[in-house]
Amino acid sequence: MIIAEQKTLEEIKQIVAGYNKLLVVGCGTCVTVCFAGGEKEVGILASELRMARQMDGQQLETVERTIQRQCEWEFVDQLKDAIEDCDAILSMGCGVGVQGLAERFPTKVVLPALNTKGMALTVQEGLWAERCAGCGNCVLDKFGGVCPIARCSKSLQNGPCGGSVNGKCEIDPEIDCGWQLVYDRMKAINMLDKLYEVQEIKDWSTARDGGPRRINREDLRL
Ligand code: SF4
Ligand code: SF4
């Protein structure tokens, strides 16, 4: 899922400064699961912002809505009535959601309340860790299902770099060396010999070919 975390209240206060009636919009999918921008967080943030404004001797009106997904028109369109008399939308969706709202409501100001961090696995309660960097050409078959692009700090496909100590990364000793994980996994599935294969330089054009990546499935359009 996509993970995100809330900007600080101070940052959000500055972002919404100058707007007096805000539509605060949550997203009911990924950011609800990671407790960043679901219905509960919308209620808390809206009330914090109102209180903060009051303490500054001013008024802020908020309208609070949470839709299932901010990345699909079907749900975004449910906001049409609420948007009318608001002077800005504060999105608690990921970066895709913010842009979805901006595209659907081109004359409205749309502001982000979250910082989007990537695609992650829920490792344990309250801990999410990136597992895919969306490179566009998955090579997990070559690395036993451990992604060297997302999990090695240097995204090395021909690793390791030689700097790891006790299985930890030289860039940050708090994180596991991605290549140690690849090695351990390949060993466990008896595929260590595959690591002798030199990987060709990754063709990043499959990931970024001069513009935003797209998947176009015409067969799904009736
Ligand atoms: S190889 Fe690419 S697509 Fe596959 S998990 Fe890693 S970043 Fe994601
Ligand atoms: S120590 Fe491991 S994870 Fe860190 S950069 Fe080197 S190979 Fe990658």
Image (cartoon, helix red, strand yellow):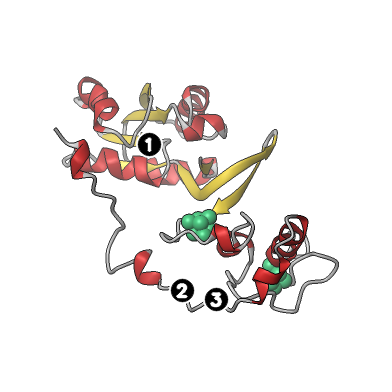
Is residue 171 at all visible to an observer of this figure? Answer: no
Question: Viewer-proximal residue, 173 or 112?
Answer: 173
Image-quadrant location for residue 60: top left
Residue type at mark 1: give it: Ser
CA gap, disc 3 and disc 2: 8 Å
Estimate the x, y position of residue 39 in percent, counting from the top left. Answer: 47, 22
Estimate the x, y position of residue 12 in percent, counting from the top left. Answer: 46, 42
Marks 3 and 1 in Cβ contact (< 8 Å): no
Q: Residue at x 25, y 22 (%)?
A: 78
Residue ranking furthest to the right: 166
Residue type at mark 3: give it: Gln
Q: Which residue is drawn at 61% across and 76% down?
A: 197
Where disc 1 sits, the SS reads strand
CA gap, disc 3 and disc 1: 41 Å
Image depth: mark 1 or mark 2 in front: 2
Question: Viewer-proximal residue, 72 or 144?
Answer: 144
Q: Quadrant location of the C terminus?
A: top left
Estimate the x, y position of residue 123 in percent, counting from the top left. Answer: 68, 41
Image-quadrant location for residue 211: bottom left
Estimate the x, y position of residue 96 in percent, counting from the top left. Answer: 36, 45
Image depth: mark 3 or mark 2 in front: 3
Q: Is residue 138 left or right of residue 163?
A: left
Marks 3 and 2 in Cβ contact (< 8 Å): yes
Where disc 2 sits, the SS reads loop
The label on residue 199 is: 3
> Could you classify mark 2 by the number of other residues whose Cα lies within 10 Å: few (under 14), some (14-19), or many (20 or more)?
few
The label on residue 103 is: none
CA gap, disc 1 and disc 2: 35 Å
Query: Which residue is label 1 attached to?
Result: 91
Query: Which residue is label 2 attached to?
Result: 202
